[in-house]
Amino acid sequence: MCEYCDMIGDKPKAVVLLSGGLDSVTALAIAREQGYEPCALTFRYGQRHAVEIEAATRIVEAMHVHDHKIVDIDLTVFGGSALTADIPVPKNQESSGIPITYVPARNTVFLSFALAYAEVLGAYDIFVGVNAIDYSGYPDCRPAYIEAFETMANLATRSTVEGTAKLRIHAPLIEMSKADIIREGTRLGVDYGLTTSCYDPDSEGRACGECDACRLRLKGFREAGLPDPGRYAKSANRAVA
Amino acid sequence: MCEYCDMIGDKPKAVVLLSGGLDSVTALAIAREQGYEPCALTFRYGQRHAVEIEAATRIVEAMHVHDHKIVDIDLTVFGGSALTADIPVPKNQESSGIPITYVPARNTVFLSFALAYAEVLGAYDIFVGVNAIDYSGYPDCRPAYIEAFETMANLATRSTVEGTAKLRIHAPLIEMSKADIIREGTRLGVDYGLTTSCYDPDSEGRACGECDACRLRLKGFREAGLPDPGRYAKSANRAVA
């Protein structure tokens, strides 16, 4: 018998955007702690690091999430990012401005699908692990953006227009540092060994330790005073973070 | 030599959502008349009426649109609509409330992709043929929704945040009756024989004449005092509209 099923009961459902990374799994754990039954949503969007999909699947199994949709969307048709086009991922660089790993309108596309999924589920809550502190400078990770999306969403669907509840976009990590996120997830029992953050993992899914995402992750664990259980390539220089 | 290429020159690009229906082709003609170079965007989203894709392709060829992206997105993964799930399309029914042909968050998903495409093109204008008068009662066809999407879009992307121009969602048909749309498109030289509106065409792509979309279309042509050049099934009772 599943201890989580037993716990779920008549909890309200919430859609959780689950990339397979450190932030999204923490958002999932927070959604559950806040009393929601999480329904996970993952995208296969032509990203180089398809290892993310495997990580999301491992997380869903380990955390007994009963509803997980993986949606195929083709963002490569437009290109324009190091994550979806044939552009090298920068290594060991200080960020300035919005980096090349930015994918045009990615969070807007992801949240739009989450809105569709929420409506079909009869859910009024969407959790997204965006973060505006230790982040990569993406415009669609900021509080003003999340608020504007929520306003739009409440005018967009049958359930938000005809229903009685208001749709809410929860971004519980938005004001947290990476170290705070790691501490909070650790408190909630998240196994970060299941997650992947690297933009450019090797053929066996091991992190490079040098891209922007790896650097933010390593810095976060160091500041939290916790070991990073992630898998890194042997050649990865984890000291650069 | 293409007379349209010659005309394009340094015109600003605009993304035009092109379903292959009457409204979207009129929006395309209006975008061109307003001085934009239209870049068409069509979705293969698991709709029953895939004949729409063929219509969009015919329109793009006939109207010499040089940039046309067809994006695969899987809205069937969620279901919840007669257009994407195994639910019959209603025939000869008066509308009341939001009908079963409503696809959860469809325009939000479509506009999100248009936003991504616009950013990659360096465009700041998106045209969408939504209509709040002779329409099917969809929430994401109303002016308040379009305005909220525009506000969100201007906080969402690199080009709207770092750029100097404001992204605009143009909905030139939003306050027009179906008859007005048909008159305007006819004035602009649109060949409505290329378009398809039916939610439930037969195997040869001929319209049923009885679904909500056919009824609105037939009523529009009648009120405009113009013949409908669309292809209808022989059995279609075009008098019911």
Image: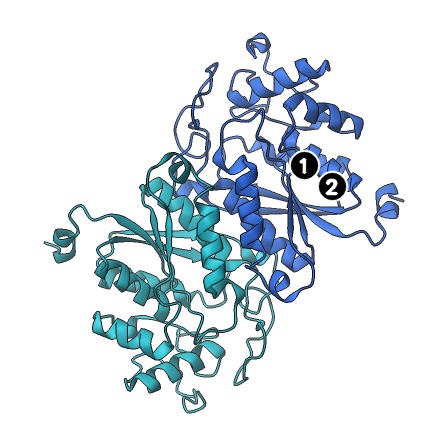
Chain colours: A blue, B cyan
Identify the element where label 1 is drawn. Answer: loop
State the quadrant of the C terminus of chain B: bottom left
Which of the marked residues, 1 or 2, is nearer the chain's N terminus?
Answer: 2
Q: Position of residue A32 (x, y in %)?
A: 77, 41
Residue displayed at 47% across by 16% down: A94
Residue displayed at 78% across by 42% down: A34
Q: Nearer the viewer, residue B88 or A222?
A: A222
Q: In the rendering, which numbered label is found on residue A31?
A: 2
Residue A142, by quadrant, is top right
- Look at mark 1 in the image and give the residue it sits on: A172
Q: In front: mark 1 or mark 2?
A: 1
Q: Nearer the viewer, residue B217 or A64?
A: B217
Q: In the rendering, which numbered label is found on residue B7?
A: none
Marks 1/2 same chain: yes
Q: Position of residue A84 (x, y in %)?
A: 44, 35
State the quadrant of the N terminus of chain B: bottom left
Amino acid type of the residue tagged 2 in the rendering = Ala
Identify the element where label 2 is drawn. Answer: helix
Amino acid type of the residue tagged 1 in the rendering = Pro
Q: Position of residue B62 (x, y in %)?
A: 23, 64
Residue displayed at 45% across by 58% down: B146
Q: Position of residue A61 (x, y in %)?
A: 74, 38
- Chain letter of the residue beneath label 2 in the structure image: A
Residue A225, by quadrant, is top right
Residue B45 in sight: no
Q: Nearer the viewer, residue B180 or B100?
A: B180
Horizontally, is B144 left or right of A231 in the view? left
Asked if the residue at tag 2 contacts the one at tag 1, i.e. Cβ–Cβ closer than 8 Å, the answer is: yes
Residue displayed at 59% across by 35% down: A130
Residue B107 in sight: yes
Q: Nearer the viewer, residue B213 or A33?
A: A33
